[in-house]
Amino acid sequence: MSWQSKYAAQFTKPLKYSLFAIIYRDMAAALASVNASANYPNIVTFHRAAKTLEQFPALLLTTERQQNARERELTRPYAANFYLSIAVAHQDPETCADMLEDYVLAIDRVLYSAWELTTSDFYSVLPLPPMGGLAAGSSAPGLPIAGSLDSLEVEDVAYDEVRRLARGGFGRAAVMSVVAEMEEN
């Protein structure tokens, strides 16, 4: 008898791409809602792997951990922890510090609004931001099974110190721990 899979679970990859697409789509509006007078630039680079940053603001989103629950009869429940880092730069260290807090608040608003107001977005095909390794015009496929995302929340935020950048100015980053509970078959 040939091999056959009991489950069709996709794990974290479709959700990660949906998160990229939702942040890409909603970030400018969220930044304006946080601090309209600042006229902050939108995120210019999106990454799935850590690398040296050359442009700011930059976002890194990667799966940090997946904790599988005991198998149920027909489903695969698990909790996924995502590492989401946002990095900003500015010529003034004080402005850089405030700017990062506004970006973190904007991302928090994007994620919670998507989860609480437009959950269907996680199951929809959405355009992805330009990213290395993906063809121009790529889209997030959306989660394959309606209702498979049980919860999404920002568990904590850790802020880095303001640092002087090699090419001038100052940079600062924050790491947001995003936790999703999912159940797939």
Image (cartoon, rainbow, N blue to C red):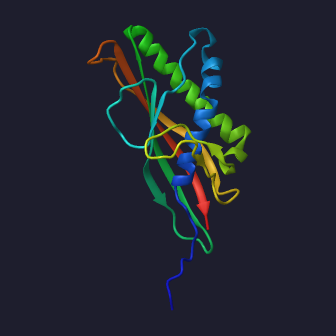
Q: Residue at x 43, y 23 (%)?
A: 56
- Percent coordinates x, y for residue 29 in the rendering: 65, 24
* Name of the residue lying farthest toward the bottom: 1
Q: Nearer the viewer, residue 149 or 53?
A: 53
Can the viewer see residue 152? yes
Q: Nearer the viewer, residue 43 or 153?
A: 43
Can the viewer see residue 153? no
Q: Residue at x 36, y 19 (%)?
A: 171
Q: How many marks?
A: 0
Q: Residue at x 38, y 43 (%)?
A: 49
* Name of the residue lying farthest toward the left: 166
- Percent coordinates x, y for residue 86 in the rendering: 45, 29
- Percent coordinates x, y for residue 149 in the rendering: 63, 53
Image quadrant holding the C terminus, namely: bottom right
Above or below for 146 versus 162: below
Q: Is residue 138 left or right of residue 115?
A: left
Q: Residue at x 34, y 15 (%)?
A: 170
Q: Is residue 182 left or right of residue 85?
A: right
Above or below for 91 versus 184: above
Residue 32 image-quadrant placement = top right
Q: Is residue 127 left or right of residue 118?
A: left
